[in-house]
Image (spheres, rainbow, N blue to C red):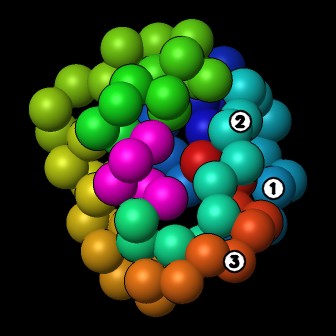
Amino acid sequence: MRTPEGEIQVDEKGKVSGRGAYLCRSRLCWEQAIAHSRLEHALKTKLSTQQQGQLLEYGSQLPDGEQHGDKA
């Protein structure tokens, strides 16, 4: 999610104020959302290389299968 201050973070509970994007709990889902700029489009912001790396690192810890529900 993108906070009102412009920070990008993962909000697993969906409670933080700001602009969010729902991604499934799947490594592949996170990789594709970042690689194809879908997350940037949903959050209406350009992700820095560092932010992309942090989000990919988070996604790499997720299972390969598709389970819906996380909000980035």
Residue highlighted by disc 3? 67
Q: How would you classify the magenta stretch by its main secondary structure?
A: helix
Q: Give residue 5's quadrant in the image.
A: top right
Q: Can you identify the residue that label 1 sits on?
A: 14
- Counting residues from the start of the chain, the first of labels 1 and 2 encountered is 1
Distance from disc 3 to disc 2, alpha carbons, whole Å, reads: 18 Å
Mark 3 and mark 1 lie on one chain; the one further toward the N terminus is 1
Q: Give how far across and how far down residue 31 sits, in percent.
A: 34, 54
Q: CA distance from mark 1 to mark 2?
A: 8 Å
Asked if 64 appears above or below 49 in the picture, the reply is below
Residue 33 visible from this viewpoint: yes
Picture coordinates of residue 29, whole percent (x, y) = 49, 59
Estimate the spatial distance between the alpha carbons at disc 3 and disc 1, rounded to whole Å.
16 Å
The local secondary structure at tag 1 comes to: loop
Tell me if residue 32 is in the magenta stretch.
yes
Residue under numbered circle 2: 20
Label count reads: 3
Q: Amino acid at mark 1?
A: Gly
Q: Amino acid at mark 3?
A: Gln
